[in-house]
């Protein structure tokens, strides 16, 4: 009698996960981060800040959408978690690193700072993927999406002080964020009304940076 191997489970298609609404939201955030990187490389920093800000907005809302959708499978939830984490690396570690390098006109002196924000970003996300939240509402270290929010706020000083002075401010800010991303401190997970505050913040800052962008030669 011939033995037959047990049937293998049918794996879903990779592209099929792109049709999941929370993942669509995550990918929209990735597109915003890509725009941030593109404009940072071009030296158009107001546009880069707009891209980063909306990457944060989509990053916040993909999880909120996922929690409200009924009937999502375990595979969809697991895939969405991994997708969100990988996009966070691009949006809030790679993008700020490129902003710093570009603002520093790609001087080798800015490479250590770029590496610091990039390496602590991946360390922080790896830690979170393994250990998760400290409790239902507390992170270990500063959540990486705050890098984008703080970076945009600090860029309000660009043009108000000399370029050299702002380069130092930017460098120190990103080093401080890198340290806080991996620091043994407890930070709150912002939910509820904070979502509305984030949207208002993004809209106001978009208007400010949009005005600056329009004034560029």
Image: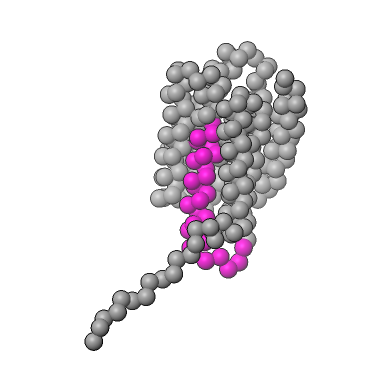
Residue 179 appears left or right of 216: left
Residue 3 in which image quadrant:
bottom left
Outermost residue, bottom side: 1
Any part of residue 183 in sight: no
Q: Position of residue 125 (x, y in %)?
A: 45, 43
Tell me if residue 128 comes above or below residue 5 in the rendering.
above
Q: How is the image coloured?
A: one colour
- Magenta span includes 83: yes
Q: Position of residue 22 (x, y in %)?
A: 60, 55
Tag count:
0
Span colored in magenta: 69-96
Tell me if residue 26 comes above or below residue 45 in the rendering.
below
Residue for point 66% across, 31% down: 47
Residue for point 73% across, 25% down: 212
Any part of residue 206 in sight: yes
Residue for point 41% across, 71% down: 9
Q: Position of residue 210 (x, y in %)?
A: 73, 30
Outermost residue, left side: 1
Residue 127 in which image quadrant:
top left
Is the N terminus in the top left, top right, bottom left or bottom right quadrant? Answer: bottom left
Is the C terminus in the top left, top right, bottom left or bottom right quadrant? Answer: top right
Residue 78 appears left or right of 51: left
Between 96 and 186, the one lying in front of the other is 96
Residue for point 30% across, 76% down: 5
Tell me if residue 10 comes above or below residue 142 in the rendering.
below
Q: Position of residue 185 (x, y in %)?
A: 46, 38
- Magenta span includes 158: no
**Helix, strand or loop for the magenta stretch, by majority:** helix
Outermost residue, front side: 2
Between 50 and 124, the one lying in front of the other is 50
């Amino acid at each position: 009698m011939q033995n037959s191997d047990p049937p293998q489970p049918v794996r879903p298609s990779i592209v099929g996960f792109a049709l999941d609404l929370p993942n669509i939201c995550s990918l929209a955030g990735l597109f915003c981060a890509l725009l941030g990187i593109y404009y940072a490389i071009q030296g158009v920093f107001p546009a880069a800040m707009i891209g980063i800000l909306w990457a944060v907005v989509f990053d916040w809302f993909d999880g909120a959408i996922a929690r409200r959708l009924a009937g999502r499978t375990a595979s969809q939830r697991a895939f969405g978690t991994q997708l969100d984490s990988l996009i966070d690396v691009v949006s809030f570690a790679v993008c700020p690193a490129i902003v710093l390098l570009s603002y520093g006109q790609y001087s080798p002196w800015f490479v250590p700072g770029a590496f610091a924000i990039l390496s602590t970003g991946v360390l922080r996300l790896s830690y979170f993927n393994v250990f998760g939240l400290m409790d239902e509402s507390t992170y270990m270290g500063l959540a990486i999406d705050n890098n984008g929010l703080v970076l945009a706020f600090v860029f309000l000083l660009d043009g108000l002080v000399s370029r050299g002075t702002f380069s130092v401010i930017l460098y120190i800010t990103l080093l401080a964020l890198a340290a806080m991303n991996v620091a043994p401190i407890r930070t709150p997970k912002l939910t509820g009304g904070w979502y509305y505050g984030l949207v208002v913040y993004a809209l106001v800052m978009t208007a400010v940076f949009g005005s600056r962008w329009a004034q560029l030669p």
